């Protein structure tokens, strides 16, 4: 993730959503994306995600009005979505999460960019992220991530936290009694990756391990070479800081892991054949 620099105070970034200023084209873009994703996600995403969409009322009606959506979200878990112009600095981001505020871009992609954008827009941020925040256990995880981030900043562990977010909140999978399911927002808001993450023979799918994930480099501009799989839809890692601080100390002595690399101690659920990335230039962060 390419992060902005500047003030650490969330108030410097929070805006009015400007709901009245969306055009009919903007709403149509949301509807096209939401309709297509909802179809693709059936049977591929955790059931709680679809339930969250319904309870929030943010299906196919058009761009959601945050004032209405937030009443429902607040009632369920005490979280609120706040409009921001784009990526905000890490510390401002962590402060918001620690206060149960989720920053969401208020702009929407243009009709000619339906499948690829570089910075997260309202469709990724709201459709992708907010449905699971209706679930108390996930709501707790995301808040604890924000608190851990503030501590990580003082321990030189920001890169470890960024990787954790990437491989859980953005690109996580989970084992369920019905089979493997998507839980990450980066997958849930992308039609191509919805199929790739679950069905392609190319990527590795490896059982989630907190220290392992924190050592693993990731691809920012393409499908992932490895997905990490939680052992159940509610098996989000415990981020107590008295557990994290010694872990970060251990990790400081250990080498980073390449995005496609498998370690002898990994519990591999699917060993990918790497076919998709073989022909591509390297890009890892
Ligand atoms: N800002 N708006 C926004 N959205 C993000 O997902 C985000 C951010 N700033 C920093 C950030 N993510 C990540 O780099 C942290 O998780 C480390
Ligand atoms: Fe995101």
Image (cartoon, rainbow, N blue to C red):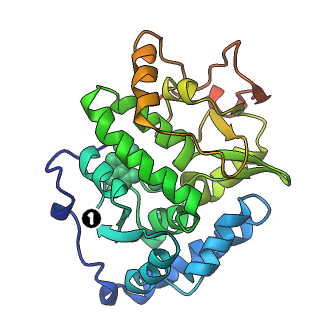
Q: Is residue 106 left or right of residue 63?
A: left
Whether the residue under disc 1 has CB within 8 Å of ligand 1: no
Q: Is residue 278 above or below residue 30?
A: above
Helix, strand or loop status at disc 1: loop
Q: Residue at x 47, y 68 (%)?
A: 126
Q: Is residue 30 left or right of residue 227?
A: left
Q: Which residue is mark 1?
A: 85
Residue ID at (33%, 70%): 82
From the viewer's perspective, is 115 left or right of 35?
left
Instruction: Tell me if 147 is positioned left or right of 8 in this view.
Output: right
Which residue is at the front of the view, 72 or 158? 72
Snapshot quadrant of residue 38: bottom right
Residue 102 can be seen in this image: yes
For the view shown, which residue lies furthest in the front direction?
242
Q: Looking at the figure, which quarter contains the C terminus?
A: top left
The residue that appears at 70% across and 27% down in the rendered structure is 274
Q: Position of residue 212 (x, y in %)?
A: 57, 24
Q: Quadrant of residue 208?
A: top right
Q: Residue furthest top?
A: 253
Whether 128 is drawn above or below 39: the answer is above
The x, y position of residue 130, in whole percent, is: 51, 66
222 is higher (above) or lower (below) than 82? above
Image location of residue 267, percent across then percent down? 74, 24
The quadrant of the image that shows the N terminus is top left
């Amino acid at each position: 993730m390419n992060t902005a620099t500047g003030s650490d105070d969330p108030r410097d970034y929070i805006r009015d959503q400007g709901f009245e200023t969306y055009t009919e084209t903007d709403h149509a873009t949301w509807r096209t994306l939401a309709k297509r994703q909802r179809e693709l996600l059936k049977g591929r995403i955790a059931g709680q995600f679809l339930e969250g969409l319904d309870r929030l009322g943010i299906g196919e009606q058009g761009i959601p009005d945050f004032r209405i959506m937030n009443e429902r979200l607040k009632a369920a878990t005490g979280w609120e979505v706040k409009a921001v112009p784009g990526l905000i600095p890490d510390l401002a981001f962590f402060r918001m999460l620690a206060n149960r505020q989720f920053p969401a871009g208020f702009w929407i992609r243009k009709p000619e960019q339906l499948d690829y954008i570089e910075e997260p827009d309202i469709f990724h941020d709201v459709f992708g992220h907010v449905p699971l925040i209706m679930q108390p256990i996930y709501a707790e995880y995301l808040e604890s991530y924000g608190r851990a981030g503030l501590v990580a900043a003082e321990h030189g562990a920001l890169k470890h936290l960024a990787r954790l977010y990437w491989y859980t909140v953005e690109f996580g999978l989970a084992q369920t009694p019905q089979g493997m399911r998507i839980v990450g927002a980066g997958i849930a808001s992308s039609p191509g990756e919805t199929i790739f993450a679950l069905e392609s023979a190319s990527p590795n799918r490896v059982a989630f391990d907190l220290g392992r994930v924190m050592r693993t480099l990731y691809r920012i501009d393409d499908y992932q070479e490895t997905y990490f799989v939680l052992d159940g839809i509610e098996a989000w890692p415990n981020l107590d800081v008295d557990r994290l601080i010694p872990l970060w100390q251990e990790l400081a002595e250990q080498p980073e892991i390449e995005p496609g690399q498998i370690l002898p101690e990994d519990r591999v659920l699917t060993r990918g054949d790497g076919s998709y990335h073989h022909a591509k230039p390297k890009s890892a962060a």
